[in-house]
Image (spheres, grey):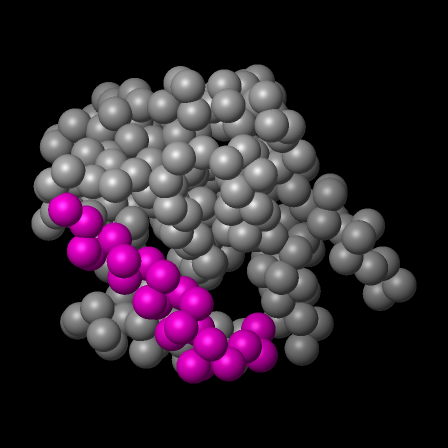
Amino acid sequence: MRYHVAPGDAVADALRELKLDGEIIVCRECLVVGDVDSDSLAEFWDRRARFIAAEYAEDEIVYHETVAEELGRLLDMEADDEVNLWFEYELFCSSNLWFCLWLLNETCAKVYRVEPVVRSETDRWLGFGKLGADDFVKCFGARVPLSRDDERLGAELWNAYRKSDFEKLRELSSRASPSFRYLAEVVDAAADRDTRPAAILAEMEIDKADDLTKIFPEFTRRAGVYGLGDLQVQSILDHISS
């Protein structure tokens, strides 16, 4: 069986329109923010459910049904399954990618990474956003097969990230792999994910009258490597003003 893991519902909808062969699994997590460590996977899901509920006023039960159970499907992959991980380069997507590879690490499924290869170096952090159908087809055609070493590297990156072991993350980022482009930049962003985005927003001299539609594009221009969405940026603004 072929599976496509989409980094959110927008990409999932685009993949459905393409009618690519295979089932779609949607990754709705945002592991770039909040506590991501735990002693077990069950505890991890519970902690994340509580965090999402507190931070974004989402329902914990809905989280378990639409996030935990959805991603939990990766644990059940068989040796003859093919998993295509449609993830972008920035920290938001990279941390989710590492987690997915950690979930897949004990399976024998054939894993591919599908990247937004049509993006220029300058626009690399924009990911799949606003790409057309032809662009998605090109990205899929250029997918990269992950070796077992690549899959283990992804799992190791997750374990270091969840423990905030930035020394280990930097060591891992030195390993050359075509499956993890811009890894060193992303790891640097991971090291200051809890402080630098807020500092960037403070540097922008935001007026109280400014709304998110004005703030978000400029923040993204300055801090695209984090890949934060409008919900995360608004949350940081709320914390700054509280």
Q: Would you say 26 lies left or right of 133 here?
A: left
Q: Residue 49, relative to residue 231: is it above or below?
A: below
Quadrant where the N terminus is found in the figure:
top left
Please tell me in which quadrant of the rendered image residue 207 appears: bottom right
- Where residue 120 sits in the image (x, y, percent)? 57, 18
Res 77 seen here: yes
> Is residue 60 highlighted in magenta?
yes
Res 35 seen here: no
| Residue at image location 19% in from the left, 49% down from the top | 77
Type of secondary structure dominating the magenta stretch: helix
Q: Which residues are magenta?
A: 56-78
- Where residue 137 sits in the image (x, y, percent)? 50, 23
Residue lying at the far right of the rendered structure: 209
Q: Would you say 198 lies left or right of 166 here?
A: right
Q: Residue 165, relative to residue 119: is it above or below?
A: below
- Where residue 30 sits in the image (x, y, percent)? 46, 58
